[in-house]
Amino acid sequence: MTTENKSRIIVALDDMDGAAAFHLARQVEGEVWGVKIGLELFIAEGASLVIDFTNRLRLNVFLDLKLHDIPNTVARAVSRAAALRASLINLHCSGGLQMMRAAKVALEALHISEAFPGTPPRLLGVTVLTSLKEEDLEWVGLGGGLAGGIAMTVKKMAEAAKAAGLDGVVCSPQEIALVRGACGGNFLIVTPGCRPEWADVNDQKRVMKPEEAVALGADYIVIGRPITKPPEKIGAPLDAVRAINSAIESALKERNDR
Ligand code: C5P
C-alpha cells in the first residue's frame, strides 16, 4: 500500500535491530517517502517486522530482497511480499524476461483479486550492482557483450524490465539520465549512492548529491548513514531529512523556474 508524501527520500535501515529500526522510522515518518528494509534486517527480524511497519507507520516500505530464481518461485515470492503491504519490491533483471514477466503477472492478479485490499506494490528491477566492475562481469561470463560497457548493460536491462511490464529500476546515479532517456518519464528510477555535501562518503565510491540525482530524473533516492548516523553539526536524523528535502525542493524549484 502506498502512502503519499512529496519527499523523495527512502531511508536505508541498515546495521540495526528491529527495535532500533522502528524507532528511527518513527522519528522521520511523515517527512520521508519511505524506508528500505533489506536482506540483513529481513533475515534477522522476519516478515512480522514488515507488517509492523506497514500497519503502524505513516510511510512506505521498500522491501529490498533482490529476488532471483525460476519464474514460478519468484512469482510466488512477490505475491507473499505484497501481502506484507510493502509499496516497492525488487528482483534482479538478470533473472531474465520470463522471470520478470511472471512476477509482474502475479502482482497484476492481486489487482483484480477481491481478497487483496488496496494497491499491490510496484515492482523494480535491479540492474548492475554498483559494486561490480566490468572485469567482475567478465569473470562470471557476463561481460564483453555490449560496446559501452556497464552503462549499456544497465540500459539494456532497464529496457528489458520495461518490456516485461516492471514499474522501474534501481540504478546508480551515473545511469539515471541514460535510463530516463531510454525508458521515458513514467518509469520509476530509484538510486542509492547519494551523499549530501555535509555527509561522509563512507564506503560509497562515485557519489552524487541527492538534489543532483533528482534533477537528473531520479524519483526516489535511497540514503542510509547520512540520516541514520548524521554528523554532529547536522543534529538528529530528522534534521538530516529536512536538510536533504529542502536541498531537493530548491533544486526542483530552480529547474522549474528556468
Ligand atoms: O548508508 P548508505 O547511504 O551508503 O546506504 C545505501 C544503501 O543502498 C545500503 O542499504 C546499500 O546496501 C544500498 N545500495 C547501495 N549501492 C547499490 C545498491 C544498494 O549503496 N548499488
Image: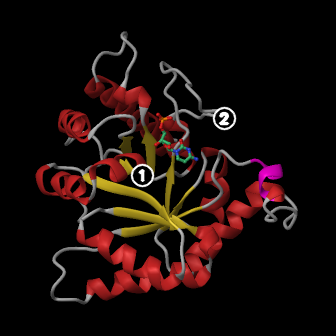
Most foreground residue, 233 or 14: 14
Most foreground residue, 163 or 249: 163
Rendered residue at 79%/65% (across/down): 142
Magenta region: which residues? 133-137
Q: Where is residue 41 shown, x and y percent of the image?
A: 35, 46
Q: Where is residue 119 shown, x and y percent of the image?
A: 24, 73
Front tag of 2 and 1: 1
Residue position marked by numbered label 2 in the rendering: 206
Which comes before the other along the chain, label 2 or label 1? 1
Q: Residues within 10 Å of mark 1 (few under 14, many from 20)?
A: some
Residue behind label 2 places its C-beta within 8 angstroms of ligand 1: no
Q: Where is residue 109 shown, x and y percent of the image?
A: 32, 88
Residue lying at the far front of the rendered structure: 44
Q: Which mark is residue 57?
A: none
Q: Secondary structure at mark 2?
A: loop
Q: 15 left or right of 48?
A: right
Q: 203 left or right of 118?
A: right
Magenta: main secondary structure equals: helix
Rendered residue at 52%/41% (across/down): 258
Q: Secondary structure at mark 1?
A: helix
Q: Where is residue 104 shown, x and y percent of the image?
A: 44, 80
Rendered residue at 24%/34% (across/down): 20
Residue position marked by numbered label 1 in the rendering: 39
Identity of the amino acid at label 2? Answer: Arg
Q: 181 left or right of 126?
A: right
